[in-house]
Amino acid sequence: MPEHDMEDIFRKKLADFAPAHNDRWEQIASTLPTEKNKRKALWIWFAVAGACLILGIIGINLIQTDNLVDQATQNPTAQVDVMDKEPNVSASSNTEEAPINNQLEMTEPGEVTNAVEPETENPTLYFEPRNKGTLKTGSNSLKNEPGKKPIEPVPQQAENPHKPSKEFAEAKEVIDPTAPLERKEELVVEAPEEPENSESTIETPTQANESNPEPLPIAIGTQPNSQPNSQPQPHPHPWSFGIGAGAYQSLFIQKMPKNPGNTYIEKQGMVARNRDLREAMEQGGSAFSQSIWVDYKPFEHWSFSTGISMLQTTQNLAFNVQNVFDDSIRGPQHFPEGGSNAVGGQYIFVNDSILPGNTATASNKYFAREIPLYINYHHKLNDKISVQASVGMSYRWVRSASVYMADIDNIGIIRLDGPENYPGIRSTFQIQGGLGINYHFNEYFALQVMPSFSYSIQSNIRFTQYVQQYQHQWGLQLKLTRNLDF
Amino acid sequence: MPRPGFYIGMTEEELIKGCKENKRQYQEALYRKYSRKIYGICLRYANSDMEAEDTMQEIFIKLFTKINQYKPGGSFEAWIKRVSINYAIEVYRKNKRLVFIDSYEGTYESSYDSSSIQKLSAEEITRLINQLPEGYRMVFNLFAVEGYTHKDIAELMGISEGTSKSQFSRAKGHLVKMLAEQLDIRKEDSNARA
């Protein structure tokens, strides 16, 4: 009989072997994440990122608009005075009638300016361009015409002076906005020449203007800007590019799995022992990063940063075999010197390589990539130095890992290429921040030194039945930036 | 719950797509389609039916969470089988102490009747394999049934290639002995009936 007969027969017979079993679907389904939960979890992260972004934008806008609000509140009576005298100024500001606007284009700004005479000491007024004509039209419409009912002044509207009043609505009924083209032309020409029209409330400014030839500082069609330097100025070089490097101290926290599953409930003792063992072994570690950055500075004080980092983290492990684990020592094994890419993550953390009676050591190296997103606040101390506070989040994923542990001949390495070969390895989100100093060499180049921290809000190693490991780190990062000319 | 035979007529691509979208109906269909085959694999590695079911359950959870890693083009069934075998071994290694018995003292029966083996059902063969000592069983399953090479097995289990070969040889001897006993029992039974 050929040597391989038995194997062939077994292989063929067992190829389609499909015995009946108890239905386990309900247990499986109860363990699987639901689509809803998955989406919910995703939305949480999007919500957090969105909230950070919105808060940043709101903060910037608040700072930007503070000065405008201040200006508006400094001279609140100017508008009210005008409105009291000229109800149609405010009322007409909401008028969208095309014929009126068309008329306005035919008028000269100077005419409009001269047609108004505010009685305030500081007559800084702001009118939308269309108000030029509206004023004229109003003036035109409000001329004392026989049989026309005079329009009452509009009461003061503290909340929104531009809101159309009831009186304006009535006035609109009296004034036909589609008709006055001919009348308006008359008025433009006639208004300065007919001082008798001063009886009309709306003509009073025109009359007053004749006695006051000085041009009024009314900004028409432009925004008042009495304090130009107090507004946040756009950064002269909003975009910058940078390269960075960092060195960190890592701290690994071992926790019990949150959901050990229903299969291994009875093995909680084993899970706890595994956690305790890893805690006993934990020696911390170091990490190094190299990164490329892109910064966007929409304003002088605020900027956003993102980029990509390559991060290498070493985790050192050591424990005394005799005291901690001597009841479960398994015989020493051998890993190839060049590294063993364990198939399907066949990697037993401790048992494979520990020699009883010794202090066993091992180290894990994780090679990860990370995408950070920071919001930064800058404060310039002088021409050369500024301080910077940064806060943000990052997403980190492990590309490969190596496990160095002493095997029977002390040269064993397990090299796990790709997270699929490393059981339990997971991508994580981190909250990150730092407070640093920027030294500006000149207009373009700056060097940043920033002590920073990274707090992982997810476990980077997550075995359902065994252990969850959180990696936090703090350290120092350097960044050289160059402002770009666009 | 999908109707019985929900997956019949459905292409494998549709089934995989539904599972990737985390649709419960498609996941259950996949489970119904492949659970018995996976259970058959698990039986070869586990010590009991219950343990095999536990392992199968964990494999499906792993399959559904990792299904995005499956790259279309290859055989899905082969992928499932590979994942199942790897996970079965992983669980086995995590939960057991792998003890290789180097002092097998049984007699090595080199001659056996292949026609007699042909008469054995798959279930009987599985039961026979299950009676092997754990270390033997792992190597025998991986080499004789799954088709791994001794080099693969050595890497997979962290042993030398020579150890794998010797373990397989001893496993085979052990199995032949058990097989002979099994066939003797059958013979006695048939004689008794006659």
Image (cartoon, coloured by chain):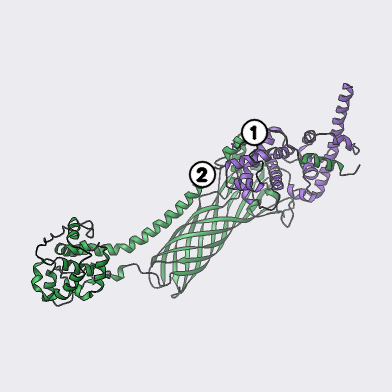
Chain colours: A green, B purple
Amino acid type indicated by mark 1: Asp
- The quarter of the image holding the C terminus of chain B is top right
**How many labels sit on residues?**
2
Which residue is under mark 1? A23
State the image coordinates of residue B108 (x, y, percent, origin top left): 88, 38
Q: x, y percentage for residue A467?
A: 59, 44
Which comes sooner in the sequence, label 2 or label 1?
1
Q: Chain of mark 1?
A: A
Where residue A136 sits in the image (x, y, percent)? 19, 69
Determine if marks 2 and 1 fall on one subunit. yes
Q: CA distance from mark 2 to mark 1?
A: 25 Å
Q: Secondary structure at mark 1?
A: loop
The disc labelled 2 sits on which kind of residue?
Lys
Q: Chain of mark 2?
A: A
A472 up-or-down from B135: above or below = below
Q: Residue at x 53, y 59 (%)?
A: A371
* Left or right: residue A304 compared with residue B136: left
Residue A36, which numbered label?
A: 2
Q: Secondary structure at mark 2?
A: helix
| Residue B105 picture quarter | top right
Label 2 Cα crowd, 10 Å radius (few <14 / some 14-19 / many 20+): few
Which image quadrant: the N terminus of chain B? top right
Estimate the x, y position of residue A98 in percent, counting from the top left: 27, 66
